[in-house]
Image (cartoon, rainbow, N blue to C red):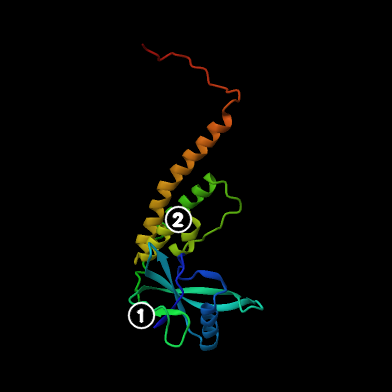
Amino acid sequence: MLPLFPLQTVVYPGERLPLHIFEERYQQLIKDCKEDDITFGIPTFINKTLDYGTEVKLQKISKKYPGGESDVICLGKRIFRVKSFHEKLPGKLYAGGEVEFLEDNDGSAEDLQEELLKNIAILYVELTIENPPVFDIPFISYQVAHKVGLALHQEYHLLTLRSELERLNYLIGHLKVTIPVVREMNRAKEVIQMNGHFKNFDPLDFEDFQL
């Protein structure tokens, strides 16, 4: 049985996750993680269901508060599917369940990584993001997943893909749809800002004009 901490978020393997722990049941969970060196799972609560999630390990307790609350840092490890869910584990306040850890196809392709980074760079230029994050090849899709404007359901879908090639292609596909939308929004903003201003139109020579 794996202790479970359902959240409306997606955690990826290798991701450092800061959490503010305030509920008594999760205060107990963090205490058990520290004392017994156990891991716990964060299944994504989406569409009123729990299915896929990620096992995480407590890295450190950054701050403790007088009332028992704490700020902690966790590290994502392995992806799982929830097989059963129990609101309370025996003798505990927190939830848990049986999970199946999923194997992954770790194969990748540098050309897809390069294409993905190229599209990310274009997106950041269109969004005029200052000091954008820098990614070096080789990398894995999870490292950039939170940096390309995915909605929660898209981040969750990425979590369900069991091939790195699938994930890279999914992110590239997302950017190929998103970038034109951002460009059109930028164009609309320019049109709105130009409204009421003097416009400098290029003169037409009508050399090739026919009626």
Q: In this rendering, would 37 be left or right of 209?
A: right
Looking at the rendered structure, the number of numbered marks drawn on it comes to 2
Q: Is residue 51 above or below residue 153?
A: below
Decide which of 15, 133 is in the foreground and name it. Answer: 15
Q: Quadrant of the C terminus?
A: top left
* Secondary-structure class at tag 1: loop
Q: Residue furthest right?
A: 66
One can see residue 183 in this view: yes
Relative to 153, does residue 184 appear above or below in the rendering?
above
Asked where in the image residue 80 lies, by quadrant, the reply is bottom left
Q: Position of residue 36 (x, y in %)?
A: 51, 88
For the point 59% across and 25% down, which residue is it?
Answer: 196
Question: Which residue lies under the disc numbered 2?
Answer: 150
Residue under pointer 1: 98
Q: Amino acid at mark 2?
A: Leu
Relative horizontal placement of residue 203, taking residue 155 as reference (left or right): right
Q: Is residue 114 above or below residue 198?
A: below
Say whether disc 1 or disc 2 marks the residue closer to the N-terminus. Answer: 1
Query: Marks 1/2: CA distance?
Result: 29 Å
- Name the spot of residue 63 as percent of width and height, x first: 64, 76
* Residue reaching furthest to the top: 211
Between label 1 and label 2, give the one nearer the viewer. 1
What amino acid type should be assigned to the residue bearing mark 1? Glu
Q: Secondary structure at mark 2?
A: loop
Decide if residue 140 is in sight here. no
Q: Position of residue 74 (x, y in %)?
A: 53, 74
Q: Residue at x 54, y 88 (%)?
A: 35
Q: Mark 1, residues whose alpha carbon is within 10 Å: few (<14), some, or many (≥20)?
A: some
